[in-house]
Each structure stands twice: as C-alpha cells, then as structure tokens.
Image (tube, rainbow, N blue to C red):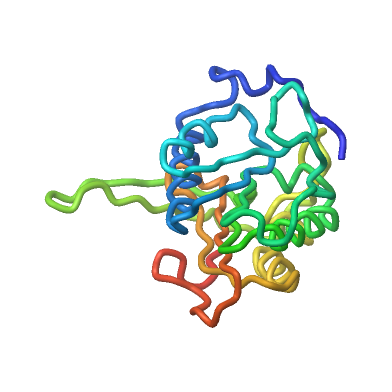
Amino acid sequence: MKKQVDKTHYEFSRYVSRQRWASMWHQLDEVLAFEPESVLEIGPGPGVFQAVAKRFVPRVETLDLDPELQPDHLASAEAMPFEDAAYDVVCAFQMLEHVPYETSLHIFRDMVRVARKGVVISLPDARRAWPYSFYIPKLGAVYFHLPLPRLHPKEHVFDGEHYWEINKAGYALSKIVKDLENVGGVSISKTYRVDENPYHRFFVFKKRDGMGRYDSKGAGISQ
C-alpha cells in the first residue's frame, strides 16, 4: 500500500462536507451499537471518528501507514500487528476502495481476524440516486432516495485514489456482499445507503454466532 493523499486533503473545509458529516454519525451509531470496550479504526483520515468515539468507548485506536496522520499504530492494513480478537470492533470507512479489489478482501479478512464482536465498513456506491425528504407531523423527517434507471454499469477508471466502486462494471452489490461473506467468520447484519449521502453505503458484519442474517434497518440487499 502507498500513501495517496497529503495530510491537507483532510482539512475541514475541504473534506468534511455536511453529507460526509451525516456519514460520520452513522459510523459512530453502528460501532456503538456493539457496545464495545475497544475499537480499531483503519484509515483515520481527519481523526473525527476517534475523537468523538473516545467519549463513549474506553479504548479507540487507529492504524495507518501515513505518519503525518499520527495513527496509534503505524503499519499497513495488509499486515496488522495484532493478535486474534484484539478489539471488539474493527472499522474502516471509505478506505477499502483505495486498494485493488483482491487486496481489499485480504485486508477485510484480517479485520475479521482482529475483531471479536464485529466489523463495520463503508464503501462508495456509484449508482446515482436522488435523495428526498419530507416532514410528517409527530413523526418527524422521512428520508428516502430514488435510484436513477440505468442500462449498463460504467467501467471504473482509477482516478489516483479509488481502484473500484460498488455498482461499477464487475462490482455489483450482490458480488461485493458475497465476496465479503466468503472471507469467513462473519455474517452480514445490514447494508444500506446513507439517506443524506447515498454515495456512502454501510455494511455491518457480526462474528458468526447463529444470529439472523439481516435486521429491519437493512433487510435484504437493495441496489
């Protein structure tokens, strides 16, 4: 793995849009749902997740190969220096697409190895969608998005950062889910696109313990 962007890439005014901020809420919500005592984040970016998660979790550590980001562990995600089940939850947000697809599966396999309770990731979903919201008295805001019709998925061209994206040619959502589950050791609990930022799709995996495959928030796999 090689460093792709400079530290300035993560400056607040450049990186943290309101849509990305909404995704950060989901990052925290999904990780905290595991009631973890320890969390490892791979690819901390601007460090917002760790800073907030530390208010709720006794031990939150980061791993990255860029010393400028000052991670707790300076190492490649392809060879994480941790024992099995070293952390309750291991997470990586908008990170795995920054490496070739087969490498991302290798990294995910090691994330599963290091996690005791579960793994939470988010990935870019390239299928365009129109986000909508409306307000219902006594119920509050209701969000949904309408995927745009398409005939053929686009080919992905490496842009200096992303090697692949969900719903580009060869990377159908069903394939991504199957390949991640085939890594072994986990079952998918939910997958969904962020209402305010449908480009970000979340996946929550639980270590296998006989629990159900999906919950009500992400029932089934929607394109």
**Residue at coordinates 70% horizontally, 58% vertically from top-left?**
114
Camera-nearest residue between 194 and 64: 64
70 up-or-down from 153: above or below: above
**Residue at coordinates 61% horizontally, 50% vertically from top-left?**
91
> Quadrant of the image for the C terminus?
bottom right
Indicate the position of residue 152 as horizontal and vertical percent values.
71, 59
Residue extending furthest toward the bottom: 210
179 up-or-down from 195: above or below: below
Indicate the position of residue 221 as horizontal and vertical percent values.
55, 69
Indicate the position of residue 157 as horizontal and vertical percent values.
82, 43
**Residue at coordinates 42% horizontally, 36% vertically from top-left?**
55
Question: Horizontal placement of 174 versus 89: left or right?
Answer: right
83 up-or-down from 70: above or below: below
Indicate the position of residue 51 as horizontal and vertical percent values.
51, 31
110 up-or-down from 175: above or below: above
Camera-nearest residue between 126 and 185: 185
> Quadrant of the image for the N terminus?
top right
Residue extending furthest toward the left: 138
Question: Horizontal placement of 196 versus 170: left or right?
Answer: left
Query: Number of labelled discs?
Result: 0
